[in-house]
Amino acid sequence: MKAELEKLIALQNLDTSIRKLEKELEAIPERRAVIEGEFDRRAFEIRALESRRDDARHSRSRLENEVTDQKGRAERAERNLMSSKKQDEYTAAIREADAARKQISALETQILEQMETLEQAEAALKERADEIATLNSDREARLKAFDEETKSQSELLAKQRNEREQVFANLPSSMSNMYARIRARIRDGVAVAEARNRSCTACFMSLRPQVMAEIRRGEDVITCDNCGRILYYVADSLQPDTAATQPNVAIT
Protein backbone atom coordinates (compact mmCIF):
# COMPACT_ATOMS: atom_id res chain seq x y z
CA MET A 1 0.00 0.00 0.00
CA LYS A 2 2.87 2.40 0.73
CA ALA A 3 4.06 2.25 -2.88
CA GLU A 4 0.56 2.89 -4.17
CA LEU A 5 0.14 5.79 -1.75
CA GLU A 6 3.39 7.26 -3.02
CA LYS A 7 1.98 7.06 -6.55
CA LEU A 8 -1.14 8.89 -5.38
CA ILE A 9 1.03 11.60 -3.86
CA ALA A 10 3.08 11.83 -7.04
CA LEU A 11 -0.14 12.02 -9.06
CA GLN A 12 -1.45 14.83 -6.89
CA ASN A 13 1.80 16.75 -7.14
CA LEU A 14 1.71 16.41 -10.93
CA ASP A 15 -1.91 17.53 -11.07
CA THR A 16 -1.14 20.54 -8.87
CA SER A 17 1.82 21.50 -11.03
CA ILE A 18 -0.17 20.95 -14.25
CA ARG A 19 -3.02 23.09 -12.92
CA LYS A 20 -0.58 25.89 -12.08
CA LEU A 21 1.12 25.70 -15.48
CA GLU A 22 -2.21 25.71 -17.30
CA LYS A 23 -3.28 28.86 -15.46
CA GLU A 24 0.02 30.55 -16.22
CA LEU A 25 -0.22 29.65 -19.90
CA GLU A 26 -3.84 30.81 -20.06
CA ALA A 27 -2.66 34.16 -18.73
CA ILE A 28 0.01 34.58 -21.44
CA PRO A 29 -1.89 37.28 -23.39
CA GLU A 30 -2.49 39.27 -20.22
CA ARG A 31 1.08 38.85 -18.97
CA ARG A 32 2.49 39.83 -22.36
CA ALA A 33 0.18 42.82 -22.49
CA VAL A 34 1.53 43.96 -19.12
CA ILE A 35 5.11 43.88 -20.45
CA GLU A 36 4.15 45.67 -23.66
CA GLY A 37 2.07 48.16 -21.69
CA GLU A 38 5.03 48.99 -19.47
CA PHE A 39 7.26 49.77 -22.46
CA ASP A 40 4.45 51.61 -24.26
CA ARG A 41 3.97 53.80 -21.20
CA ARG A 42 7.67 54.59 -21.01
CA ALA A 43 7.81 55.30 -24.75
CA PHE A 44 4.76 57.55 -24.45
CA GLU A 45 6.40 59.49 -21.62
CA ILE A 46 9.55 59.97 -23.68
CA ARG A 47 7.59 61.01 -26.77
CA ALA A 48 5.64 63.49 -24.63
CA LEU A 49 8.90 65.00 -23.36
CA GLU A 50 10.28 65.20 -26.89
CA SER A 51 7.05 66.81 -28.10
CA ARG A 52 7.14 69.26 -25.22
CA ARG A 53 10.74 70.14 -26.04
CA ASP A 54 10.05 70.57 -29.76
CA ASP A 55 6.90 72.62 -29.14
CA ALA A 56 8.83 74.90 -26.79
CA ARG A 57 11.56 75.38 -29.41
CA HIS A 58 9.05 76.20 -32.12
CA SER A 59 7.10 78.53 -29.86
CA ARG A 60 10.25 80.30 -28.79
CA SER A 61 11.32 80.76 -32.41
CA ARG A 62 7.88 82.05 -33.39
CA LEU A 63 7.79 84.48 -30.45
CA GLU A 64 11.28 85.76 -31.23
CA ASN A 65 10.14 86.48 -34.80
CA GLU A 66 7.15 88.33 -33.44
CA VAL A 67 9.44 90.37 -31.17
CA THR A 68 11.50 91.30 -34.22
CA ASP A 69 8.34 92.40 -36.00
CA GLN A 70 7.19 94.44 -33.01
CA LYS A 71 10.58 96.10 -32.70
CA GLY A 72 10.31 97.08 -36.33
CA ARG A 73 6.85 98.44 -35.60
CA ALA A 74 8.21 100.43 -32.66
CA GLU A 75 11.04 101.86 -34.75
CA ARG A 76 8.59 102.96 -37.44
CA ALA A 77 6.41 104.57 -34.81
CA GLU A 78 9.43 106.41 -33.43
CA ARG A 79 10.30 107.66 -36.90
CA ASN A 80 6.72 108.75 -37.47
CA LEU A 81 6.79 110.49 -34.11
CA MET A 82 9.90 112.42 -35.06
CA SER A 83 8.52 113.39 -38.45
CA SER A 84 4.95 114.13 -37.42
CA LYS A 85 3.74 117.68 -38.06
CA LYS A 86 0.17 117.34 -36.89
CA GLN A 87 -1.17 116.60 -33.44
CA ASP A 88 -3.19 113.60 -34.57
CA GLU A 89 -0.13 112.12 -36.31
CA TYR A 90 1.92 112.68 -33.16
CA THR A 91 -0.72 111.08 -30.96
CA ALA A 92 -1.09 108.08 -33.29
CA ALA A 93 2.67 107.56 -33.37
CA ILE A 94 2.89 107.62 -29.57
CA ARG A 95 0.08 105.10 -29.28
CA GLU A 96 1.68 102.88 -31.88
CA ALA A 97 5.06 102.97 -30.12
CA ASP A 98 3.48 102.25 -26.71
CA ALA A 99 1.47 99.35 -28.10
CA ALA A 100 4.58 97.86 -29.73
CA ARG A 101 6.59 98.16 -26.51
CA LYS A 102 3.81 96.50 -24.47
CA GLN A 103 3.56 93.71 -27.01
CA ILE A 104 7.34 93.22 -26.93
CA SER A 105 7.26 92.96 -23.12
CA ALA A 106 4.46 90.38 -23.23
CA LEU A 107 6.25 88.38 -25.92
CA GLU A 108 9.52 88.41 -23.97
CA THR A 109 7.68 87.04 -20.91
CA GLN A 110 6.28 84.25 -23.07
CA ILE A 111 9.76 83.56 -24.46
CA LEU A 112 11.12 83.17 -20.94
CA GLU A 113 8.29 80.72 -20.15
CA GLN A 114 9.07 78.68 -23.26
CA MET A 115 12.79 78.71 -22.41
CA GLU A 116 11.97 77.34 -18.94
CA THR A 117 9.75 74.66 -20.46
CA LEU A 118 12.48 73.81 -22.95
CA GLU A 119 15.13 73.52 -20.23
CA GLN A 120 12.91 71.29 -18.09
CA ALA A 121 12.13 68.96 -21.02
CA GLU A 122 15.77 68.75 -22.07
CA ALA A 123 16.84 68.04 -18.48
CA ALA A 124 14.26 65.25 -18.17
CA LEU A 125 15.35 63.75 -21.48
CA LYS A 126 18.99 63.93 -20.41
CA GLU A 127 18.18 62.02 -17.21
CA ARG A 128 16.50 59.32 -19.28
CA ALA A 129 19.14 59.27 -22.03
CA ASP A 130 20.32 55.74 -21.18
CA GLU A 131 16.74 54.49 -21.07
CA ILE A 132 15.97 56.15 -24.41
CA ALA A 133 19.05 54.59 -26.01
CA THR A 134 18.13 51.05 -24.97
CA LEU A 135 14.33 51.17 -24.78
CA ASN A 136 13.65 49.25 -27.99
CA SER A 137 16.39 46.67 -27.37
CA ASP A 138 15.24 46.23 -23.76
CA ARG A 139 11.70 45.67 -24.97
CA GLU A 140 12.78 43.05 -27.49
CA ALA A 141 14.99 41.30 -24.92
CA ARG A 142 12.21 41.26 -22.32
CA LEU A 143 9.66 39.86 -24.76
CA LYS A 144 12.17 37.30 -26.05
CA ALA A 145 12.85 36.13 -22.49
CA PHE A 146 9.09 35.96 -21.87
CA ASP A 147 8.54 33.90 -25.03
CA GLU A 148 11.35 31.53 -24.05
CA GLU A 149 9.86 31.16 -20.58
CA THR A 150 6.41 30.38 -21.95
CA LYS A 151 7.93 27.89 -24.39
CA SER A 152 9.69 26.14 -21.49
CA GLN A 153 6.45 26.12 -19.53
CA SER A 154 4.61 24.59 -22.49
CA GLU A 155 7.26 21.89 -22.84
CA LEU A 156 7.16 21.19 -19.10
CA LEU A 157 3.38 20.99 -19.20
CA ALA A 158 3.47 18.44 -22.02
CA LYS A 159 6.07 16.41 -20.12
CA GLN A 160 4.10 16.45 -16.88
CA ARG A 161 0.87 15.51 -18.64
CA ASN A 162 2.63 12.49 -20.08
CA GLU A 163 4.05 11.55 -16.67
CA ARG A 164 0.62 12.00 -15.16
CA GLU A 165 -0.95 9.60 -17.64
CA GLN A 166 1.69 6.98 -16.85
CA VAL A 167 1.29 7.32 -13.08
CA PHE A 168 -2.50 7.25 -13.33
CA ALA A 169 -2.41 4.19 -15.59
CA ASN A 170 -0.18 2.30 -13.16
CA LEU A 171 -2.58 2.74 -10.24
CA PRO A 172 -5.05 0.00 -9.36
CA SER A 173 -8.41 0.87 -10.89
CA SER A 174 -10.02 1.17 -7.45
CA MET A 175 -7.50 3.84 -6.43
CA SER A 176 -7.51 5.69 -9.72
CA ASN A 177 -11.32 5.78 -9.68
CA MET A 178 -11.33 6.99 -6.08
CA TYR A 179 -8.80 9.69 -6.87
CA ALA A 180 -10.78 10.84 -9.92
CA ARG A 181 -14.05 10.99 -7.96
CA ILE A 182 -12.54 13.05 -5.14
CA ARG A 183 -10.73 15.39 -7.51
CA ALA A 184 -13.88 15.94 -9.58
CA ARG A 185 -15.96 17.11 -6.63
CA ILE A 186 -13.35 19.35 -5.02
CA ARG A 187 -13.01 22.82 -6.49
CA ASP A 188 -9.24 23.17 -6.07
CA GLY A 189 -8.60 19.73 -7.54
CA VAL A 190 -6.58 18.60 -4.51
CA ALA A 191 -7.57 15.02 -3.80
CA VAL A 192 -4.52 14.06 -1.71
CA ALA A 193 -3.43 16.14 1.29
CA GLU A 194 -0.80 15.90 3.98
CA ALA A 195 -1.79 15.16 7.56
CA ARG A 196 0.32 17.35 9.79
CA ASN A 197 0.11 18.44 13.41
CA ARG A 198 -2.86 16.09 13.84
CA SER A 199 -4.94 17.90 11.24
CA CYS A 200 -5.73 17.84 7.53
CA THR A 201 -3.70 20.55 5.79
CA ALA A 202 -6.43 20.99 3.16
CA CYS A 203 -9.47 21.69 5.38
CA PHE A 204 -7.58 22.23 8.68
CA MET A 205 -9.90 19.97 10.64
CA SER A 206 -8.41 18.02 13.55
CA LEU A 207 -7.90 14.29 13.11
CA ARG A 208 -8.69 11.70 15.75
CA PRO A 209 -5.59 10.04 17.29
CA GLN A 210 -6.60 6.65 15.93
CA VAL A 211 -6.98 8.06 12.40
CA MET A 212 -3.64 9.82 12.67
CA ALA A 213 -1.99 6.57 13.75
CA GLU A 214 -3.46 4.75 10.74
CA ILE A 215 -2.23 7.49 8.42
CA ARG A 216 1.26 7.20 9.90
CA ARG A 217 1.31 3.47 9.25
CA GLY A 218 0.35 4.00 5.60
CA GLU A 219 -1.06 0.50 5.25
CA ASP A 220 -4.51 1.65 4.07
CA VAL A 221 -5.93 4.57 2.16
CA ILE A 222 -7.38 6.90 4.79
CA THR A 223 -9.61 9.83 3.93
CA CYS A 224 -10.41 12.94 5.93
CA ASP A 225 -13.73 12.64 7.78
CA ASN A 226 -14.47 16.29 6.98
CA CYS A 227 -13.39 16.95 3.38
CA GLY A 228 -12.98 13.38 2.09
CA ARG A 229 -9.46 13.87 0.73
CA ILE A 230 -6.92 11.04 0.82
CA LEU A 231 -4.43 11.72 3.61
CA TYR A 232 -0.73 10.91 3.89
CA TYR A 233 1.96 11.55 6.46
CA VAL A 234 5.49 12.83 5.92
CA ALA A 235 7.92 12.03 8.71
CA ASP A 236 9.35 15.08 10.48
CA SER A 237 7.59 17.42 8.03
CA LEU A 238 8.24 21.05 8.85
CA GLN A 239 7.01 22.88 5.78
CA PRO A 240 4.24 22.44 3.19
CA ASP A 241 5.10 20.55 0.03
CA THR A 242 5.80 22.55 -3.10
CA ALA A 243 3.73 21.74 -6.18
CA ALA A 244 6.33 19.73 -8.04
CA THR A 245 8.06 17.96 -5.12
CA GLN A 246 7.27 14.37 -4.28
CA PRO A 247 7.52 13.81 -0.51
CA ASN A 248 8.64 10.59 1.13
CA VAL A 249 5.92 8.62 2.87
CA ALA A 250 6.79 7.80 6.45
CA ILE A 251 7.62 4.20 7.19
CA THR A 252 6.85 3.34 10.78
Image: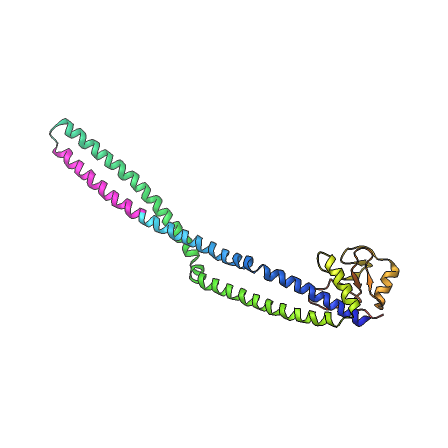
Q: Main secondary structure of the magenta part?
A: helix
Establish if 7 lies above or below 207.
below
Q: What stretch is highlighted in magenta?
A: 59-83
Residue 70 part of the magenta segment: yes
Q: Which quadrant of the rendered structure holds the N terminus?
A: bottom right
Q: Is residue 197 left or right of residue 160?
A: right
Vertical arrangement, residue 61 with respect to residue 168, above or below:
above
The colouring scheme, among rainbow, by chain, secondary structure or one colour, is rainbow
Residue 151 vs 101, above or below: the answer is below
Q: Report x, y in % for residue 198.
A: 83, 59
* Residue situated in front as seen by the camera: 48 or 36: 36
Residue 248 visible somewhere in the drawing: no
Residue at the farthest top position: 87
Residue 132 image position (x, y, % from top left):
43, 59
Image coords of residue 219 (percent x, y): 85, 69
Residue 90: image x %, image y %? 16, 30
Quick one: 180 or 234, which is closer to the camera? 180
Residue nearest the viewer, comparing 112 with 184: 184
